[in-house]
Amino acid sequence: MRRTRARTPAELVGAAPETEFQLTFDGRPVRALPGQTIAAALWSAGILTWRTTRVHGRPRGAFCGIGACYDCLATVNGRPNQRACLLPAAPGDTVMTQEGDGHAELER
Amino acid sequence: MPNSNDEPGTRETGRVELAVVGAGPAGLAAAVTAADHGLDVVLLDAAAAPGGQYYRSPAEGLGATRPGALHHDWPTFTELSARLAAHRDTGTIRHLTGHQVWTVERTGDGDWILHAVTGADEEVRTAVRARRMLLATGAHERQLPFPGWTLPGVVGAAGAQAMLKSGLVLLGSRIVVAGSGPLLQAVALSLTRAGARVPALVEAAGYGAYARAPRVLAANPGKAAEGARFAAELAGARVRVLSHRAVTEVHGDERVEAVTVSRVDRRWRPVPGTGRRIACDALAVGHGLMPQLDLAVAAGCGTRPGPDGTHAVTLDEQLRTTVPGVWAAGESGGIGGVELALCEGELAALSVVREIRGGVRGREARRAVALRRSRRRLRAFADLMGAVHRPGPGWREWLTDGTEVCRCEEVGAGRIRTACEELGAGDTRTVKLLTRAGMGWCQGRTCGFAVRELAAAHGGGQEPGGPDRRPLACPVKLSTLADLSGPG
């Protein structure tokens, strides 16, 4: 293994990504690279929180990073309860902070 | 036969000789070895690319020209991948990517049917029918709760590593790495190589404890050398290694701003007055790994407790589980690392071949003997590692009543204490029924170990031996479940 110390992860692996694209998070544009998950794109933009809990309304984001803990649930393109750490980002995705169980609209 | 596309239902495959679940190091080694010997194999894996958690690599679109820079022993993986690709081309291995196996069932004639879902909305359901099944389902990280661990910016150490390896992202620029176990060193090094500053690696156990088993160390000189290399490289990256210490509090309102690191005694009891604040914008934390046993338990395989405090599948020297027709390899049989997983994957496949053929020829028999010897040596080291880093009972003392133990259902340590001390709960199941701890989305994967320890300590009760039972390995829709019993 190379014992280099890079300034960024992309530099470390010599990444030459394909053209970046845009998604929106709560209405604001976020850039993503092809192949990144929703969570990775959000982390890149410095966003760590995209869910509030059902009981105490506390902020949450990715925790286990491998799809086991379900803390990173977000509403993506209108569908609640999507695991952001597994779901690949796609151009034009609409990602919304998921409040509670994400079904508030159904209960109205 | 596949159903027509406009009708929901399950696609079924023809019967195969061997189904391998999991395409990490153990599953990959098993699948290619079995295929080398002419078995027809279906390899099911939840991810889009082979490698599992260990050999996770950047998605193709990220165009990594040096993916190996984030990995130890990358050539082993490229070799396995090439063999997999060759077998895929000839059709010996059908690699079903993106297939999450959620349950298994046995048919009347002794075959196994593995049920998998594909896609975020379970668009495709697949049923694989196999004569034999080899489980290489890996592990997930063991977590212990502490005040502030639900704050954004606190992530699993394995999670930080996974996000870095696959998405080339860091969750902060100044990341404290904490918990216990050898994974922490690897994570700290990856983060620094990728440009983050890691001010401290906080380890609750002490590395000196390894010296208490000189014979195991002597038999595994490579492991000792690796430890020395890690230490030197951590020093080079200006990572302070703080052993016999733990993060006992996380500070910040909306996200991490600092952590308090306290000294802990041999039983992991925090020593009052020793807390020191370290500024950081993220914390990567983990306390070792836990085998993922859902499918093995669903299949009826026996399990055993290990020296690390987790349960693992009971295996014989041939990597057979207690259920005929079911083998397991890698972390499923006890946390042991990549070298052991590769060894066991190959050995398990040879064992399957041996059973089908009623024996193996000279070269394979000699290979199996060598693999069994390696396995014994590596398992001895794994047991040592597990014992050194097994959480001491004193960790409970860093909890406050308000510390959330179950992240899904937001159940605080105080409520669990009440359930145990006042309501008489003495085991995980009763605590769960009284408090909802472990009843959420993750089905207790995250809090299970902690709840078990809290229940055992407060209730004074004897926890029943086995691991948590989860009839479904992941949440599925009711329609998927109904499809099992519906018309095929």
Image: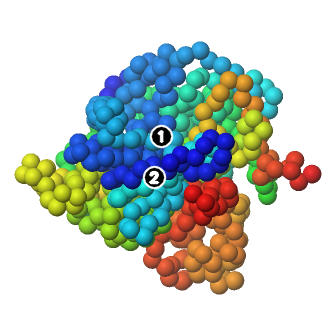
Q: Is residue A106 left or right of residue B83?
A: right
Q: Residue at x 78, y 38 (%)?
A: A78
Q: Is residue A56 left or right of residue B410?
A: right
Q: Is residue B128 left or right of residue A67?
A: left
- Subunit under mark 1: B
Tell me how many marks there are: 2
Frontmost residue, B196 versus A35: A35
Quarter of the image with the C terminus of chain B in it: bottom right
Tag 1: residue type? Thr
Q: Residue at x 54, y 83 (%)?
A: B461
Q: Label 2 belongs to which residue? A: B128
Q: Label 1 belongs to which residue? A: B97
Secondary structure state at the residue bearing disc 1: loop
Frontmost residue, A68 versus B3: B3
When the figure is inspected, residue B302 is found, relative to residue B483, above or below; the finding is: below
- Residue at the far right: name it: A108
Secondary structure state at the residue bearing disc 2: strand
Frontmost residue, B253 versus B221: B221
**Residue B231 location, x and y as percent?**
33, 40
**Residue B338 location, x and y as percent?**
33, 46
Q: Residue at x 35, y 56 (%)?
A: B134
- Subunit under mark 2: B
Q: Earlier in the sequence, mark 2 or mark 1?
A: 1
Tag 2: residue type? Val
Q: Residue at x 44, y 66 (%)?
A: B106
> Badge 2: few (under 14), some or many (20 or more) residues near its Cα, within 10 Å?
many
**Residue A12 location, x and y as percent?**
44, 22
Between the residue at mark 2 and the residue at mark 1, the CA separation in whole angstroms equals 13 Å
